[in-house]
Amino acid sequence: MPENPDPSPKPENPGRSLGALLRRMRMDLSPLRDSRDFRLLFGSGVIGMFGTFLTLVAVPLQMKQLTDSPLAVGLVSAAEFVPMVVCGLWGGAIADALDRRKIILYTEVGLCLTVTILLVNALLPEPRVWVLYVVGAMSAGFGSLQRPSLESLMPRVVRHDQLAAAAALGAFRWNLGAIIAPGLSGLIAAAYGVAAAYAINVATFLASLVLLWLVKAPPQAEDASPASIRSMVEGVRYAAGRPDLMGTYLVDVAAMVFAFSTALYPFLADQVGSPESLGLFYSAAAVGSLIASVTSGWTGHVHRHGLGVIVAALVWGIAVALAAVMPNMWGILAFFALAGAADMISGVFRATIWNQTIPDSYRGRLAGIELLSYTSGPMLGNARAGLMDHLGGTRFSLGAGGLLCVGAVVALAGLLPKFRDYDARTDEHAVRERARREELARATAS
């Protein structure tokens, strides 16, 4: 007679449960394994990031050496703002009208030429100050023209179900570079001079160009709308007609405007009695972001991306507010790291919504809008932080900004139910885009 099976549930093996949890959190490397073009773009990005940081460190250093004026150094960023805005929008329009791969290659050549000009200027007996402003504006223009094409190329080279993993890998690349590259770039520029930094950057652009040349992304559709002011307006109308997309932009802008406060870091370091540790305040968020990206495997199992953006933005604001009341440097750094981790997770979910739902015919123009949303927010945030510091002090500015961020995000979550309730499994745009990509894959295979 067979034994009666034990009806009671078997206790779960703790070791197996822990192993499953760790596997779920582990970064998903499948886009690197499965997509040759993604590997090439990723490699180009790693090389290009190091070179870019070399110039980002070298230009302010050279301007300081030539003028010894903080205002002159600050005006370099001001010179870049208008080209960034104009070329970002136009870059989105041409990304939907022309061959994105060619745009990326041509703008990469343009960026390489701008650094070559900086190198030649640095080798002159008397380098010209105006060259730094003009080339800074040119570089911002080329970079903004390129970014929408790069962003909109990603869904073409990565499977639909791997887009969240691809976004996490991109964040990992950026955060690792943000931690390592600035310090290394500063050492090179200080030890060997800005000309050496520019020369190395030229070499990185040439290496990046080789990788980009090898990318074999499909060309643009023949019936694509030509780039024009009208097409740019159509892109804005499309974004405005989709509350789920507007939620990604508005929540991010609100989070940055109210809680981005890097302008306060020098004053905060003085207040905790550790001005020599200023660099740690800048790197804390990047460290938190890097940890979040390394353990981002779980994000691929999340489908409520809108709610994910909201929760991450709330954590960002709360972490900034709590940092304001920490009595010592280590407590502040811990909450800055938490804020950085939350910002990284928000970025992954926002990028997933964009890449999984926006039709390819609009992807470039929407990438241009995205560029403006995540570059203008920090600029406005630092202006807000400085004004509130003037009114109530550094910690008041930091804490109040975090709380205002929480309030703004809660209000936006209430005003945008389609964004809050977004689900990649059922959203009409996500379902339609997934079906389109599956049909395209079948057609390509046959």
Image: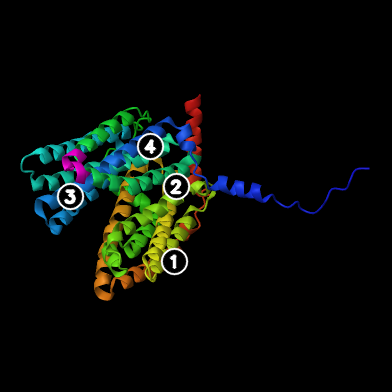
The magenta stretch spans which residues? 189-197
Amino acid of disc 4: Phe
- Can residue 204 be seen from the camera position used here? yes
Amino acid of disc 2: Thr
| Magenta region includes residue 194 | yes
The location of residue 74, given as percent across then percent down, is 17, 56
Residue designated by label 3: 61
The location of residue 358, given as percent across then percent down, is 41, 45
The structure residue drawn at horizontal position 34% and vertical position 27%, both measured from the top left corner, is 214
> Quick one: label 1, few (<14), some, or many (20+) residues within 10 Å?
some
Q: Earlier in the sequence, mark 2 or mark 3?
A: 3
> Quick one: label 2, few (<14), some, or many (20+) residues within 10 Å?
many
Mark 1: secondary structure? helix
> Quick one: label 4, few (<14), some, or many (20+) residues within 10 Å?
many
The location of residue 104, given as percent across then percent down, is 29, 35
Residue designated by label 1: 410
Mark 2: secondary structure? helix
Residue designated by label 2: 352
Q: Earlier in the sequence, mark 2 or mark 4?
A: 4
164 and 249: which one is in front? 164
Residue designated by label 4: 42
The location of residue 400, given as percent across then percent down, is 35, 71
Distance from the alpha carbon under mark 3 to that under mark 4: 29 Å
| Magenta region includes residue 85 | no
Amino acid of disc 1: Val
Amino acid of disc 3: Leu
